[in-house]
Amino acid sequence: MSNAAKEKDKEKESFPAYEKVMAARDSKKLTAVDYISKMFGDSFIELHGDRRFSDDKAVVGGIAMLYDTPVTIIGIEKGRNTKERVERNFGQAHPEGYRKALRLMKQAEKFHRPVLCLVDTSGAYPGIGAEERGQGQAIAENLMEMMTLKTPVLTIVIGEGGSGGALALAVADEVWMLENSVYSVISPEGCASILWKDSSKAPQAAEALRMTAQDLFDLRVIERIIRQPRADDQAMFESLKLLVSRTFEKNLALDTAELTEQRYARFRRIGAIG
């Protein structure tokens, strides 16, 4: 076969995982504030600041009513237009964003409120200022504290779930993903740059990373795949709200020792052989 024919065959090659990556990054998809608005309406009260440095607008957090139950909601917000994306730092949180999230989680623990996290980020912000203010430590503290948080935690990946920036809000009793979302230790472009020194091989990297919702469900990394809702599909949001409510109701019935033990056991099972 000639080189030209080989190149033509390569162009026809399908990379469904990378198609999911593109769908997760789609600028027209719903963002965290959309889900909060659709599911909780005017009951949501936003809270600000980490009480140390500033308020990171890439992380939206507050309190809302889930039917008759008060809940804490924390979402990573990318923004819906250019102005918003710049203001939200394209969903790349600084350390103060993760510290704000932890502050709200510890507040929820004090009042035994369930915590709902909505994840949509390519990763934590990698800038010098973020590193100087302790980005790695902020993420590590979230991982440690969430593992023993004495109140139910549920995380839904609603777009990109990238690296530690996503995991810092995903040490939960259960992790769910929308059907067109991805969750991975690294972006396909970053992986391709490391493995092949060629970021154009990102589609092949996406397949190898097993980062789609179906892949991760098969690997028992997540518990549920959620159908992608449209903006006008209020019935879908009501269904999702009911599902979240039932999950919290089930976990609120557990005593705190059993709740944290089950969370720990969940992570121990990931990657186990046999």
Image (cartoon, helix red, strand yellow):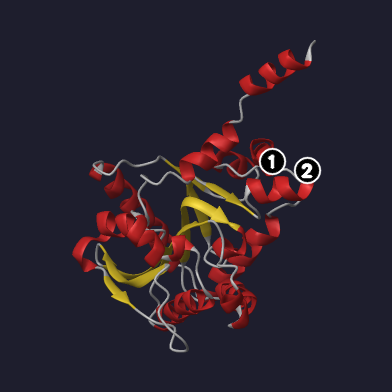
In the displayed structure, 214 sits above or below 32; it is: above
Question: Which residue is at a point 58% across and 43% down the rendered structure image?
Answer: 217
- As drawn, which residue projects farthest toward the bottom? 52
The N terminus lies in which quarter of the figure? top right
Q: Which mark is residue 99?
A: none
Q: Which circle, 1 or 2, is nearer the viewer?
A: 2
In the picture, measured across the screen, residue 104 lies left or right of residue 220, that is: left
- The reply to whether dot 1 and dot 2 touch (C-beta < 8 Å) is yes
Question: Which residue is at a point 57% across and 76% down the rendered structure image?
Answer: 130
Camera-side residue: 80 or 99?
A: 80
Label 1, secondary structure: give it.
helix
Residue 85 at x, y percent in the picture: 39, 59
Q: Which mark is residue 205?
A: 1
Residue 239 at x, y percent in the picture: 31, 46
The image quadrant that residue 95 belongs to is bottom right
In the picture, measured across the screen, residue 171 lies left or right of residue 229, that is: right
Residue denoted by label 2 = 196
